[in-house]
């Protein structure tokens, strides 16, 4: 479902990386050093199926990711994975929600145009009639000091 | 047996009579003897809910999870096009121009309205502020929050956006909005308790048709609403999940 990123979509000078996902598939990503600041007062919301395929996004999600709603629905959530994010963070996310618990963490996300944005994310299982029918993630604006801590910490987790 | 109806204590004071008129209208339409009991404080409301006294409630989103998951309430309707939003305000002369400028021990004024406070505290997080490092100023209502700002007794205030918009021009001129939330998926909902649930469909039908009826439309006006809109169970579950993520 995820195709390589295309140079014509990228804004500014970019670098290339190849991400290998949890399922062994890989994708070429193009990324720049352009940060999009988190918009004040907004929440970025998405819901996935139990296996992490995006099933709902709100408008703030569309605006911040740079993808259209049609491109996002049906895509795996790793469409936003940034090469600077250590796999350990997402392993912790999945281990936590699979235990039925809430996960919270700071994530650097990759935009369609190669830029990035930092979020403070909370992911919870959606339990309906005792069954997990999906997961919801709500992101809010992170503090600069917390982002700076992650910028120092994440490279040590590779 | 009489049915007990209540409205979350964060109702706008000038809508109080509107809720009584609504109660009378609903009694007639549903042919249920409904008694409206208004509580001034969340503590009293929560006590009544704990004692299973309530059958119908116009509930704050913060209470929705508890009502559904612990007390077996189900959603009926929400006010069409209305959602709960919060603003962070400062004195117009304040040298704070960005939430990120705020430091620990900031004096924060707010009311006991739980969802507004939650949204407000989330908007203060970018400055690393949390309940443990602010100086809280619990105020009786949103006007008093504004007054704390005017008198320089608080550095920032958390106010329901609708209440802020309804403040007098005089007061608003002396305030400045730092952030206004744009969440749009958190709202108050009219909910029905277990004792009355055999009438859920009837109530939903009556309420959804209310704006088409001349009298009903007038009553809605008294509440400041244009119409009621049905809430699907999944919509309510989604909002509860959302509140759950924010509550951390
Ligand atoms: C509800 C939910 C939201 C997620 N949001 C993101 C996200 O915003 N960015 C991201 O890189 N991964 C997100 N993930 C994690 C991805 O599913 C995935 O684990 C991650 O991108 C790493 O890819 P991989 O697990 O295939 O290696 C989310 C997962 C869930 C369940």
Image: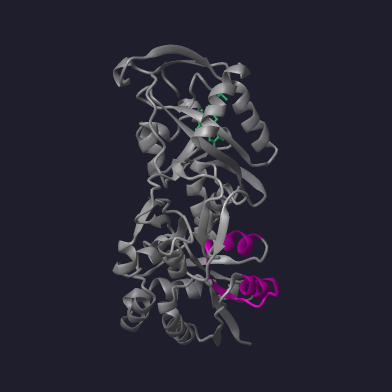
Residue drawn at (31%, 82%), measured in percent from left and top?
B214
Residue drawn at (43%, 57%), measured in percent from left and top?
B85
Residue drawn at (39%, 41%), measured in percent from left and top?
A39
Residue segment shown in magenta: B43-69
Looking at the image, residue A95 sits to the left or right of residue A121; the answer is right
Magenta stretch, overall SS: helix
Specify the quarter for ligand 1.
top right
Q: Nearer the viewer, residue B105 or A134?
A: B105
Q: Nearer the viewer, residue B194 or B54?
A: B54
State the scheme by which the image is colored: one colour
Residue A38 percent location from the top left of the image: 42, 37
Q: Is residue B233 visible?
A: no
Residue A37 percent location from the top left of the image: 39, 34
Residue A42 percent location from the top left of the image: 42, 45
Q: Is residue B247 above or below residue B8?
A: above
Q: Is residue B85 above or below residue A34?
A: below
Q: Is residue B54 within the magenta segment?
A: yes
Residue drawn at (50%, 60%), measured in percent from left and top?
B109
Q: How many marks?
A: 0
Q: Quadrant of the N terminus of chain B?
A: bottom right
Q: Is residue A65 above or below residue A138?
A: above
Residue B6 percent location from the top left of the image: 55, 77
Displayed quadrant of residue B15: bottom left
Q: Is residue B29 within the magenta segment?
A: no
Looking at the image, residue A126 sits to the left or right of residue B217; the answer is right
Q: Is residue B215 visible?
A: yes
Looking at the image, residue B220 sits to the left or right of residue A107; the answer is left
């Amino acid at each position: 479902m995820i195709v390589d990123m295309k140079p014509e979509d990228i804004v500014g000078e970019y670098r290339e990386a190849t991400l290998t996902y949890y399922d062994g598939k890989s994708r070429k990503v193009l990324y720049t050093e352009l940060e999009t600041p988190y918009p004040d007062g907004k929440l970025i919301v998405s819901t996935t199926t139990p296996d992490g395929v995006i099933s709902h996004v709100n408008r703030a999600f569309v605006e911040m990711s740079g993808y259209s709603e049609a491109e996002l629905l049906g895509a795996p959530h790793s469409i936003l994975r940034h090469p600077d994010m250590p796999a350990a963070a997402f392993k912790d996310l999945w281990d936590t929600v699979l235990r039925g618990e809430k996960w919270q963490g700071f994530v650097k996300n990759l935009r369609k145009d190669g830029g990035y944005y930092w979020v403070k994310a909370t992911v919870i299982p959606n339990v309906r009639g005792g069954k997990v029918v999906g997961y919801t993630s709500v992101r809010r604006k992170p503090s600069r000091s917390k982002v700076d801590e992650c910028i120092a910490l994440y490279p040590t987790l590779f | 047996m009489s049915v007990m109806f209540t409205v979350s204590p964060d109702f706008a004071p000038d809508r109080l009579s509107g809720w009584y008129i609504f109660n009378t209208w609903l009694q007639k339409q549903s042919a249920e003897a409904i008694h409206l009991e208004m509580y001034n404080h969340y503590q009293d409301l929560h006590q009544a809910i704990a004692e299973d006294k309530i059958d119908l409630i116009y509930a704050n989103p913060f209470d929705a999870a508890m009502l559904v998951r612990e007390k077996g309430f189900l959603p009926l309707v929400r006010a069409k096009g209305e959602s709960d939003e919060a603003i962070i305000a400062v004195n117009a002369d304040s040298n704070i121009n960005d939430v990120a400028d705020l430091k620990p021990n900031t004096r924060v004024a707010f009311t006991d309205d739980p969802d507004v406070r939650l949204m407000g505290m989330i908007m203060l997080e970018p400055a690393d502020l949390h309940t443990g490092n602010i100086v809280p100023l619990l105020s009786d209502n949103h006007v008093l929050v504004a007054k704390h700002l005017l008198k320089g007794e608080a550095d920032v205030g958390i106010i329901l956006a609708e209440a802020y918009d309804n403040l007098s021009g005089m007061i608003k001129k002396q305030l400045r909005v730092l952030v206004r939330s744009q969440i749009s998926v958190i709202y108050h909902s009219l909910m029905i308790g277990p004792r009355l649930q055999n009438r859920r469909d009837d109530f939903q039908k009556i309420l959804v048709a209310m704006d088409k009826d001349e009298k009903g439309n007038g009553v809605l006006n008294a509440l400041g609403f244009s119409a009621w809109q049905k809430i699907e169970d999944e919509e309510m579950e989604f909002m509860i999940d959302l509140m759950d993520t924010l509550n951390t």
